Amino acid sequence: MSETASIGIIGGTGLYQMDGFTDVREVAVETPFGPPSDRLMLGELEGRTVAFLPRHGRGHRILPHELNFQANVFAMKTLGVEFLLSVSAVGSLKEEYAPLDVLVPDQLIDRTQQRRSSFFGRGLVAHVAFAHPFCPVLSKLMALGCEEAGARHHVGGTYVCIEGPQFSTYAESQLYRSWGADVVGMTNLQEAKLAREAEICYATLAMVTDYDCWHPGHDAVTVDTVMRILAQNVATARAVLRAVVRRLPLPRACECEHALRHALLTPAELVPESLKRELGPLVGRYLR
């Protein structure tokens, strides 16, 4: 089996392994940012080599704000991933997005406070464009995968990423609703930013588990409630992901592939050689 994979999957709460994943072996990937959430699993899915990582570690051991997002995305880049599919549990901020529904978001709002969202700094400055945080091509494939899997789904919408690990207050939930946001979660903002810096196409499958606390009768979101819904959502997520993987890889004609082309501001001669080596998988083709 290949040592590399052009397709990566980051599994969220409840999705710690993939059905139909064969010839699986674990790979320990070292990164300049420390260890990923867990050993990555390389295997065959729908005839494609895929790299899979459980976001919170097997057994769900890592809180959202404790996640090493840099290491997770860098590890995917190191393995050659160009298409990164993410699954995450979210709360709904709108009546029409019911538990067990699926949303393919196209926008993000950052409400986190203490997370690292960039590979750059320490002598190398970069500012990537991020107006459209999710890859439109990969998101379209996610929507097609939802249709093929028969999932009740919604295309487009805004994901509010909160710090956690606590759920929102009632006032916060109403605030996000007043902004016109659609779902609230705790993980996708950093992944999307880092995937863009790594020139990886990134899309999210947001699995609705509850109505957050704004909804009458849902003013006390509990882990038990979320887990009951997740058990059903996981089967849907696996079916959608398999449908998407069947359509990959494909030629890349989106802005993701060349996100760093005009983003690096520091002249190459001023960048420390050690940093060039460290970030080689990201900037090697731009900084000689």
Image (cartoon, rainbow, N blue to C red):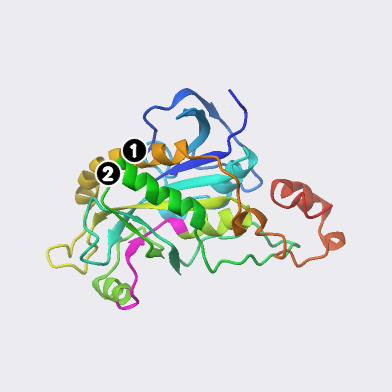
Per the model, the C-alpha gap separating discs 1 and 2 is 9 Å
Residue 230 x %, y %: 26, 45
Residue 8 x %, y %: 52, 40
The image shows residue 122, relative to residue 207, as above or below, that is below
Q: Residues within 10 Å of mark 2 (few under 14, many from 20)?
A: few
Residue 273 x %, y %: 83, 52
Name which residue type carries label 2.
Gly
Q: Secondary structure at mark 2?
A: loop
The image shows residue 93, relative to residue 60, as above or below, that is below
Name which residue type carries label 1.
Ala
Q: Residue at x 76, y 53 (%)?
A: 275
Q: Is residue 48 left or right of residue 33?
A: left
State which region is magenta.
Answer: 178-188
The residue under label 1 is 239
The residue under label 2 is 150
Q: Nearer the viewer, residue 237 or 224?
A: 237
Tell me if I can see residue 63 in this picture.
Answer: no
Tell me if I can see residue 69 in this picture.
Answer: yes
Q: Nearer the viewer, residue 46 or 68?
A: 46
Quadrant (top left, top right, bottom left, bottom right) of the N terminus: top right
Which of the labelled discs sits on residue 269, or is there none? none
N-terminal of the pair, mark 1 or mark 2, is 2
Q: Are marks 1 and 2 in contact (CB under 8 Å)?
A: yes
* Residue 183 in magenta stretch: yes
Q: Residue at x 22, y 63 (%)?
A: 96
Q: Residue at x 29, y 73 (%)?
A: 177
Residue 191 x %, y %: 51, 54
Q: Residues within 10 Å of mark 1 (few under 14, many from 20)?
A: some
Question: Which residue is outermost to the right?
Answer: 269
